Amino acid sequence: MEPGRPHRRPGRRRPAPAARPAPAAGRLRSRGEVLTITGDDVVHEGEPMIYEIREYTTVPGRMPALVKRFNEVTRAQFAKHDMECVFLSLTTVGDNTNNELVYVMKFDSLADMDAKWSAFLSDPDWIEARAASEADGPIVAKLHRRVLNPEPFAG
């Protein structure tokens, strides 16, 4: 065995990578990337997914109402509007440990994010459920959001 070269057993070769079959048209998702399928059966990498972090600071004492709304209404509304929540949690260590809910949404692009949030926020079912959940007063005191782009680290 030569120094610096991996050892391979005699007579065993790695098979050549198979070509990825692709449908005639459409989109596939793979590890945070959008893969666009064109008529030439070639997979082209598109822009990477983006992630939105949303941090809700509740009015003191209103965290149970926010958790209830997420479990009973918000998550179902996300599904209705094809919105993917990839992480949802309460803060347990650090600032705002008693009144902060943090979640991360995944979108195909900024345009996708804008369109889905617009549809979500204008949905009559959401408007009604939000109003009902706030009958005893406001729940969210402050919303902080960031949109993240992992593209510089793809590869």
Image (cartoon, rainbow, N blue to C red):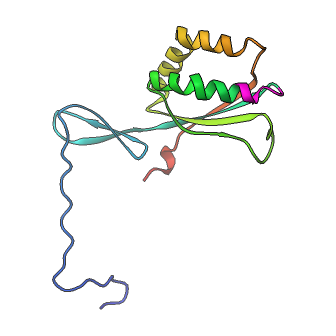
Residue 94, can we see it?
A: yes
In the picture, the quarter occupied by the N terminus is: bottom left
Residue interval drawn in magenta? 60-65
Residue nearest the observer in this picture, 43 or 21: 21
Magenta region includes residue 6: no
- Given the current orientation, which residue lies at the most extreme bottom position? 1
The reply to whether the magenta stretch includes residue 64 is: yes
Residue 50 pos. (x, y %): 50, 36
Q: Nearer the viewer, residue 42 or 87?
A: 87
Whether residue 81 is visible to the viewer of this picture, yes or no, is: no
Instruction: Name the residue at 76% across, 16% down.
Output: 138
Query: Residue 4, how many percent across, how many down?
Result: 37, 84
* Nearer-the-camera pick, 151 or 93: 93
- Residue that protrudes farthest toward the right in the picture: 60
Left or right: 12 as drawn, with respect to 98: left
Residue pictured at 64% horizontal, 24% vertical:
69
Relative placement, left or right, of 25 versus 116 is: left
Task: Say which quarter of the image contains residue 56.
Answer: top right
For the image shown, how many numbered marks are present on the structure? 0
Q: Is residue 46 left or right of residue 141?
A: left
Q: Position of residue 104 (x, y in %)?
A: 58, 37
| Residue at 52 percent of width and 11 percent of height | 123
- Judge whether 40 appears above or below 60 on screen: below
Q: Give the residue displayed 23% in from the left and 85% down from the top.
A: 9
In the image, is 46 to the left or to the right of 75? left
**Image quarter of residue 35:** top left
State the image coordinates of residue 67 (x, y, percent, origin top left).
Answer: 67, 30
